[in-house]
Structure formats: structure tokens, C-alpha cells
Image (tube, grey):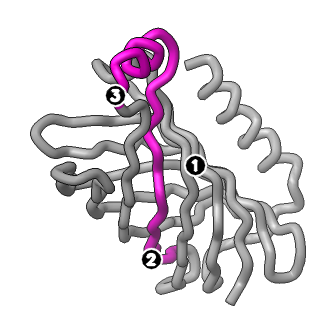
């Protein structure tokens, strides 16, 4: 939790120090690294690492619709990983999240986002989970049509129970 609060403070500090320019109302594509820290019952001895693409299309001055997809790997860590390896069991599982939603830019660089979609397991019999992800972030211009995007979100996958995590995304976006 301390790492999450530190990350939020860093994003806020960068936003206040940056030369504000409204990031909304621009078509852009971003490619980013994803990190997830599970919450609840499944939070011990695992983490999520992956990558994603996100397309933003403006529909109003401060509001963009989004489409995103990527690949995430849930990796078992610590003592649990050692025990599973001893029995020859898998220690990582792949997922493909596909989501659509929106971003509302407020206060220049800062935004609130919400997405809905599905997450597909890559293992046989893994199935598909309903996915939702509200979050906050900031986007900072680094060139005429380029920006860096940092976001934090709560993401939940629901299929025969719920699996959720706090996700962090660092991305490079370029205007189209």
C-alpha cells in the first residue's frame, strides 16, 4: 500500500511540475508496460506482468473513448512457486484482456478512466472472465504529438469468483 501511495504522490508531483497542456481531444495510440499487485485472498505469492496497447478517440473536448488489449502473465512467486516447481506444476498463467471504455481529462494532464470488457485465459479450459477497471492517471507531453502516460487502476476479473488487483501502467503515446 505504501508503494501505491508513493506512486500516486509521484504522479501528482510530476503533474504539478509539468507545463500543463490539455491532453484530451487527440487521437492517439499508446504502448505500455503493465504491473499488477493482487488484492484479497489471492494476493499472497503472485504478481502480474504484461504489456498493452490502447487507442483513444476523441468524442468531446475532454472525453475520449478507449479500446485496449494486451497480454498479462500471472506469475506465482516465493515459497508457493518453489512448492509447485517441486511437483512439476505450472508457475505462470497467461491472459488476454480486451476492454473498451472512456477517459475524461480534468485539470489539464490528469484523467479518470473506466473500462469494461473480457479477459481470456490462454490455457485450455481457462475460460473468459468479465472485466472492469476504473482508474486515475496523468499524461505528459514530451514532443508535438508524443506523450508519456502513467496510470493506476483497480481491475477485477469475475468468473466463478473474483480475482482483482491494483494495476500500474507506464506507456508511450503518439498522436495519429
Mark 1, residue position: 34
Q: Which residue lies most toward the bottom here?
A: 176
What separation in Å lies between label 2 and label 1 (alpha carbons)? Answer: 20 Å
**Screen quadrant of the N terminus:** top right
Q: Nearer the viewer, mark 3 or mark 1?
A: 3
Which quarter of the figure has residue 87? top left
Which quarter of the figure has residue 128? bottom left
Q: Is residue 82 magenta?
A: yes
Q: Is residue 127 magenta?
A: no
Which labelled disc corresponds to residue 89? 3
Q: Are marks 2 and 3 in contact (CB under 8 Å)?
A: no
Query: Which residues make up the magenta segment?
Result: 63-89
Sequence-wise, which precedes: disc 2 or disc 1?
1
At label 1, counting other C-alpha atoms closer than 10 Å, the crowd grade (few under 14, some 14-19, many 20 or more) is: many
**Screen quadrant of the C terminus:** bottom right
As drawn, is 101 to the left or to the right of 147? left
Mark 2, residue position: 65
Image x and y of residue 99, in percent:
36, 66
Q: Residue at x 78, y 49 (%)?
A: 15
What separation in Å lies between label 2 and label 3 (alpha carbons)? Answer: 41 Å
Sequence-wise, which precedes: disc 2 or disc 3?
2
Image x and y of residue 17, in percent:
88, 47
Label 2: element kind: strand
Image x and y of residue 127, in percent:
18, 54
Q: Residue at x 64, y 71 (%)?
A: 30
* Vertical placement of residue 122 versus 86, above or below: below
Which labelled disc corresponds to residue 130? none
* Vertical placement of residue 167 versus 5, above or below: below
Camera-side residue of 104 and 49? 49
Amino acid at each position: 500500500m505504501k508503494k501505491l501511495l508513493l506512486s500516486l504522490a509521484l504522479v501528482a508531483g510530476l503533474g504539478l511540475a509539468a507545463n500543463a497542456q490539455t491532453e484530451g481531444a487527440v487521437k492517439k495510440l499508446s504502448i505500455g508496460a503493465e504491473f499488477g499487485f493482487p488484492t484479497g485472498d489471492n494476493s499472497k505469492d503472485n504478481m502480474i506482468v504484461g504489456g498493452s496497447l490502447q487507442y483513444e478517440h476523441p468524442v468531446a473536448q475532454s472525453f475520449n473513448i478507449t479500446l485496449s488489449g494486451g497480454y498479462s502473465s500471472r506469475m506465482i512467486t516465493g515459497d508457493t512457486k518453489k512448492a509447485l516447481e517441486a511437483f512439476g506444476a505450472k508457475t505462470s498463467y497467461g491472459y488476454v484482456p480486451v476492454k473498451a471504455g472512456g477517459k475524461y481529462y480534468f485539470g489539464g494532464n490528469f484523467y479518470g478512466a473506466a473500462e469494461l470488457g473480457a479477459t481470456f485465459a490462454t490455457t485450455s479450459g481457462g475460460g473468459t472472465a468479465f472485466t472492469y477497471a476504473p482508474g486515475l492517471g496523468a499524461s505528459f507531453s514530451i514532443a508535438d504529438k508524443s506523450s508519456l502516460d502513467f496510470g493506476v487502476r483497480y481491475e477485477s476479473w469475475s468468473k466463478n469468483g473474483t480475482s482483482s488487483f491494483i494495476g500500474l501502467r507506464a506507456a508511450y503515446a503518439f498522436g495519429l
